[in-house]
Amino acid sequence: MKKISFIVPCFNSESYMERCIDSLLIGQESIEIIIVNDGSTDNTKKIAERYVKKYPTIVKAIHKENGGHGSGVNVGLKEAKGEYFKVVDSDDWLDSTCLKKLLNKIETMKERPDLIICNYIYDHLYEKQQKIMSFNNLFKENKMSTWNDIGFFRVSQYLIMHSLIYKTSVLKKSKLKLPEHTFYVDNLVAYQPLPYVKTILYLNLDLYHYFIGREDQSVNEKVMITRVDQQIKVTKLILSSFNLEEIKQKSKKLYRYLLRMCSMMIVISSIYLIMINNTEALEKRKELWCSIKVLDIKLYHKLRYLNLAGLTYLPGKIGNFITLKGYKLSKKIFKFN
């Protein structure tokens, strides 16, 4: 069995996908690379087929009609044969040395964790700036853990998709299925399977380079403003994924983290609605909070009055001003887009 299935969703990725795929090939026969060409109109298909021809036992290409990033992940999960599963966006890449160490670790492990966590890097390649996001304050390195063993998250720390390597069987057990034609579904990958994870291994490896800088990139601030409805859609899907009170009975620390992620999703949606700053956008923010109240009144009160999310729903123009100032300061410090 292959150790890791790497899924590379591609849409018109001709100018950067080779950097991504080449960084994975260091894994050789211990991995599989599934390139999902999501209805590209450029040379993505041609490049993918060239890799298949050159590495027929490692690379597989799937060509499909356009369905969005989530559709590509869904197809990749269905086809994955590896013990572990990782999505690598086509404009990102992995550190080759760290990938070798990861694969060697999997090879020598007697007990296989449900989830492997590695560091990721916000890579502002064009500006030659990097920000490493590590988790050594949360987990003991190279030691099997459970959710009850984790430490306290810093303000900037979240287990985003780029830091996670799930056991494929865990993802399938969670019945993860992402919506099509929707951006920001990586948040669902980093949220919905977590209650199915029982054992965790943290490796202090700066593995994933998360590229920041393309003008058409989904995390570009201007782009996010135009796609705020999709951000809200994903936020609502996350909020409705579980009954958090039931999870609290099993693991208070996992519950606190999931609640924290719900809060951050609301913060992101709210900030971009405030940036739009018209009647329609502010009404959408109100509707988002109303939908939470209808969904779960207890969750609403915790998010509204006992969490960071509530600070993005302060009254009036002064409240909006304070929210945006806080966002701009965080952006300057953590360089997340």
Image: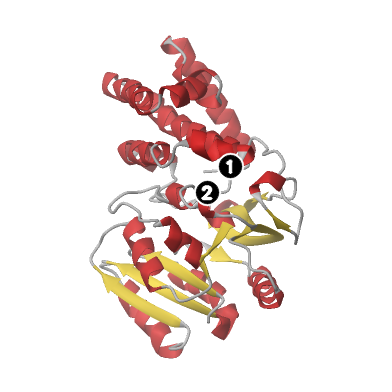
Could you tell me the amino acid type at mark 1?
A: Lys
| Labelled disc at residue 250 | 1
> Residue 192 in the image: x percent, y percent?
45, 49
Tell how many labels: 2
Kindly check if marks 1 and 2 are in contact, taking CB atoms under 8 A apart as contact: yes
| Labelled disc at residue 87 | none
Secondary element at tag 1: helix
In the image, residue 15 above or below residue 316 = below
- Name the front one of labels 1 and 2: 1
In space, the residues marked 1 and 2 are separated at their CA atoms by 9 Å
Residue 206 visible in this rendered orientation of the protein: yes
Q: Badge 2 is on which residue?
A: 195
Q: Residue at x 64, y 51 (%)?
A: 130
> Residue 292 in the image: x percent, y percent?
38, 27
Could you tell me the amino acid type at mark 2?
A: Pro
Q: Badge 2, how many Cα within 10 Å: few under 14, some, many 20+?
A: some
> Residue 283 in the image: x percent, y percent?
30, 20
Left or right, 247 with respect to 218, comes to right
